[in-house]
Amino acid sequence: GALQYILQHTVDVTELQKLRKLRDEVGVVRRAEAIQARNRDLARESRRLLEFFQQAPGFVAVLGGPDHVFQMTNAAYLELVGRSELVGRSVRDSLPEVVGQGFVDVLDQVHQSGQPYIGRREPVVLEGSNDPSQTRRVLNFIFQPIFDPDDKVTGIIIQGYDVTEEVEYEERQALLIQELNHRVKNTL
């Protein structure tokens, strides 16, 4: 029962450790590549959504905060108001002519109540660079509140259509019908 020999068996595991470390690094690289691919997909989706926003058939603007600061506008909105630089400025500062027409009060109400406002055939006078410089337009639009996850209003989406030509056509048509009725009565 006395110890006669000691057997030492040494195995060099340096290569094994290097392989394990390399495997872990490859895993990190693969995860990084996957994240980069996902980021590219998200960037592509963001660009596409911005293209949709810009090409929307109606006018669209996104306002932020209780001061109604422009965060985004599409080309149709800029053309409607006859201005080019609105982002970062409030509605009150950018479009002072709409303040006296009550539209900022309506925006305040939408922001406070969280209830959308639908405007149907509402006249508005805009003083941008349009020709003539003061333009009376008739608009169908909605002021739609934007909510955060806690159901707090953080902004408003303005979306609508310019129906001025349609309204003017209907007015001309009604005038022509009245004139025709008048002439028929005179003839009879």
Image: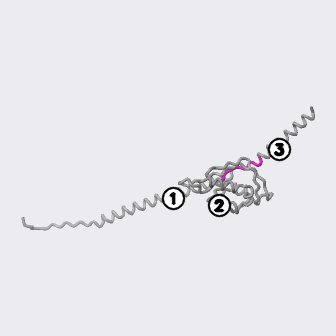
- Mark 3 falls on what kind of element? helix
Quadrant assignment for the C terminus = top right
- Give residue 172's mark: 3
First in sequence, mark 3 or 2: give its number.
2
Q: Give the range drawn in magenta.
A: 158-165
Q: Which amino acid lies under the numbered mark 3 shown in the image of this protein? A: Arg
Q: Nearer the viewer, mark 1 or mark 3?
A: 3
Q: Position of residue 56 (x, y in %)?
A: 66, 51
Q: Distance between the residues labelled 3 and 2?
A: 40 Å
Q: Nearer the viewer, mark 3 or mark 2?
A: 2
First in sequence, mark 1 or 3: give its number.
1
Q: Which amino acid lies under the numbered mark 1 shown in the image of this protein? A: Asn
Write the residue at 39% across / 63% down.
25
First in sequence, mark 2 or 1: give its number.
1
Q: Which amino acid lies under the numbered mark 2 shown in the image of this protein? A: Asp
- Mark 2 falls on what kind of element? loop
Residue closest to the eye, 49 or 180: 180
Q: Position of residue 109 (x, y in %)?
A: 65, 54
Quadrant assignment for the N terminus = bottom left
Q: Where is residue 43 in the image (x, y as percent from the top left)?
A: 55, 58
- Give residue 39's mark: 1
Q: Name the residue under label 2.
A: 67
**Dominant secondary structure (helix, strand or loop) of the stretch shown in magenta:** strand
